[in-house]
Amino acid sequence: MRILHRMFHERGTRAFRWTEGVVWTIIAFSILLFGVELILTEALADRGWASWLTAVADKPLWEGLLETLRLVDLLILILFSLELVSRVLSWRPPDLDFYERDAPEVIWLHLVRRLGYLLRPMSVIDLVAILAVHPYLRGLRALRVLRLLRLWHLFRHANPVTDILEAFWVNRLLYRAAFAFLAAVTLLGGLSIFLIERTENPDINTLGDGLWWALVTLTTVGFGDITPITPLGRLLGAGMMIAGMFTLATFAGLVGSTLLTSILNFRVEQFRMSNTVGHLVVLGYTEGSRLLLPTLLEAVPRGLRIALMAPHERPEDLPRVMDWISGDPARQHHLDRVRLAHAESVLVVGRRDISPDQADAQTLLTLFTIRAHLGQAKVSRRRPLHVVAEILDAENVQHARTAGADEVIESTQVGFSLLTHAVIAPGAAPVVSHMVRAGSYNLYEDPLPAALPPGTTFAEACAYIRQRGAMLIGVHETSEEDEVINPSQDRELKRDTKLIYLGKERLLEDRA
């Protein structure tokens, strides 16, 4: 039993992988065998598109081959049966390792828990697939295709099949009650119609006929093959029809409520399962940042995908071209939903519905979470993720840089500085606002282009930039982290020097 348990239940072990490989080989072979058997059956009956086979060889040859295939198919079903029996017998109920029980209780627990394991959705699929081993149930051979549901592990992130099955399993008590009600009404209705009309109705000869009529009536299918003919039988039928309406409403509400969460979770996983790369991620968007949306649409290159994530539902005014993913940016596993490790850049927006200190604390926590997430992500990138963070309190700027932000925007301080400057320097504020507005002239910082070798003076670089319709206003020495606005004209530029210029668009080639 220990060996069987390792083979069928201990995932990750060599024995489990070997067993799964053998089982999958048999499943694939059995489905292929079933398809060939269908083709030969159609050919021997001289019907369908497979009838051309009879012209290739004699029927006795195909009949002999068909009999051989059926024997092999029977052997495969026996192997499936042995596999299911071994799986159930080698499964150990967790209760045995937790509770101290007497021998009779242990035996009873083994029986009950193993029966419950056999009634799990995936086990029921295996059980239904092997019922065709009985000659009377050979028509159920097509159900073996359901075993392909074992492909759940091919879903890298979210599996809709297991999510739906889990929804049924979690709410199994409700489903038991609903099916118990259905079984009780069917039994009472079938037994009653059998006792009432067995001597009057020629269509009701056995209890099975009565149960069939009750189930068909209760589910409002109404085949019409059995119809009550006595007044009492018709009265019973009316009661069954009314009960059927309540039964359908019960199951509709139950299925709708239990599957809704699974469907919503699968919708959340859609972006993560995509192949999106090089996109822009905005974390922490709130209603107070609504003016950010048109700016993003105007400033970012056309075709760049924008994904926003925050722990609330999609805002109604969010443009449809933007992707919305519900999640908490401060939770590391939620960052997988926006494929953060595959993004080009990320913008962490400060919240406007709380105090600046609380908003900055949330931003810092998000930055630390981003750094932890990138540290664990196994993605080989050509360039690191560019992280931009908005800070509302200037005292937290250094903390944001320590937390991993490449650039920090002091939005509140910048706004107040612009207001103050407008007082002491009238007319300057509209110019600055025009410069930083999307779609107009903006500041850019790019590496030194290949056309300007090291040793080029600032004056020569100014002439080079002016020829391209922009204006050079400063340099940034990355090795020294020194930014100089309007340096001397004879200042020599180094290979790691970045140029700060004012232009309508980015002009220089990014050498990073």
Image (cartoon, rainbow, N blue to C red):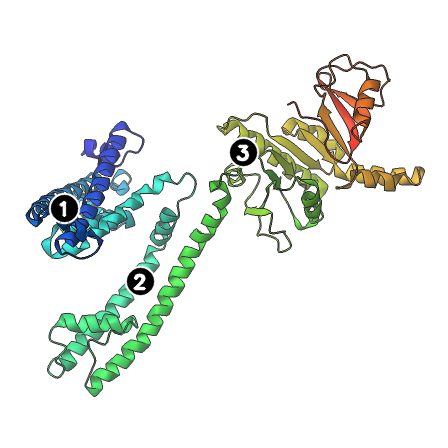
Rendered image quadrant of residue 205:
bottom left
As drawn, is 346 to the left or to the right of 42?
right
Q: Return the mark for residue 342.
A: 3
Quick one: label 1, few (<14), some, or many (20+) residues within 10 Å? few
Q: Earlier in the sequence, mark 2 or mark 3?
A: 2
x, y (%) of residue 128? 21, 52
The residue located at (73%, 38%) in the rendering is 392
x, y (%) of residue 188? 21, 73
Quick one: label 2, few (<14), some, or many (20+) residues within 10 Å? few
Quick one: label 3, few (<14), some, or many (20+) residues within 10 Å? many
Using the image as rendered, state which of residue 35 and residue 127 is in the foreground.
35
Rendered image quadrant of residue 282:
top right
The residue located at (65%, 37%) in the rendering is 347
What residue sits right under mark 1 in the picture? 56
Q: Return the mark for residue 97.
A: none
Rendered image quadrant of residue 200:
bottom left
**Residue 217 vertical placement versus 441 (above, below):** below
What residue sits right under mark 2 in the picture? 177
Name the front one of labels 3 and 1: 1
**Residue 223 vertical placement versus 420 (above, below):** below
x, y (%) of residue 283? 61, 41
The residue located at (82%, 18%) in the rendering is 460
Label 2 SS: helix
As drawn, is 80 to the left or to the right of 491?
left
Q: Amino acid at mark 1?
A: Val
Q: Amino acid at mark 2?
A: Ala
As drawn, is 472 to the left or to the right of 254?
right
**Residue 89 vertical placement versus 408 (above, below):** below
**Residue 456 vertical placement versus 402 (above, below):** above
Q: Amino acid at mark 3?
A: His
